[in-house]
């Protein structure tokens, strides 16, 4: 079976920290040199590649934005778990 589900902030932060180091801005405005080629398919391929890089940058930004929500959610769940633990242990 997989890893246990944890609701602590440290685990959530560790899980999403890998996304924070990704530089999604590095794709924007990338120049794809095709030299002096006049072959239409190569030019179209370069255009598609440039669009794809822009889309990947947007996807990466979106993933990072969603990943940041995990730490906020973990804070809420951790607080709720602590409250539930007190309630079930007789308030101790």
Image (tube, helix red, strand yellow):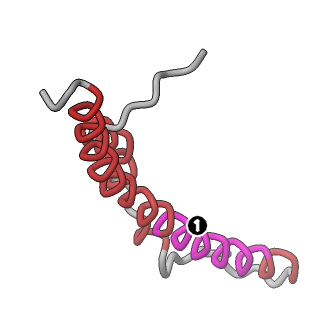
What residue is rendered at 12% in x and 27% in y?
Answer: 92
Q: Is residue 64 left or right of residue 32?
A: left
What secondary structure is marked by label 1? helix
- Answer above or below: position of 44 versus 3: below
Can you give x and y, in whole percent of width and height, for residue 85 in the image? 26, 31
- Answer above or below: position of 3 versus 48: above
Give the magenta range. 45-61
Q: Label 1: how many residues lie within 10 Å, few (<14), some (14-19) or many (20+)?
A: some
Can you give x and y, in whole percent of width and height, for residue 73 in the image? 36, 54
Quarter location, residue 49: bottom right
Q: Is residue 60 left or right of residue 37?
A: left
Q: Which residue in the rendered view is the most extreme toward the left?
A: 92
What residue is rendered at 57% in x and 76% in y?
Answer: 54
Q: Nearer the viewer, residue 88 or 69?
A: 88
Q: Nearer the viewer, residue 23 or 4?
A: 4
Residue 9: within the magenta?
no
Q: Which residue in the rendered view is the most extreme toward the top?
A: 1
């Amino acid at each position: 079976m997989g890893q246990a589900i944890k609701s602590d902030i440290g685990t959530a932060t560790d899980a999403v920290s890998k996304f924070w180091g990704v530089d999604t801005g590095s794709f924007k405005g990338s120049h794809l040199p095709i030299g002096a080629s006049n072959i239409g398919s190569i030019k179209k391929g370069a255009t598609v590649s440039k669009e794809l890089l822009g889309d990947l940058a947007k996807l990466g930004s979106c993933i990072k934005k969603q990943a940041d929500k995990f730490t906020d959610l973990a804070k809420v769940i951790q607080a709720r778990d602590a409250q539930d633990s007190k309630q079930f242990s007789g308030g101790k």
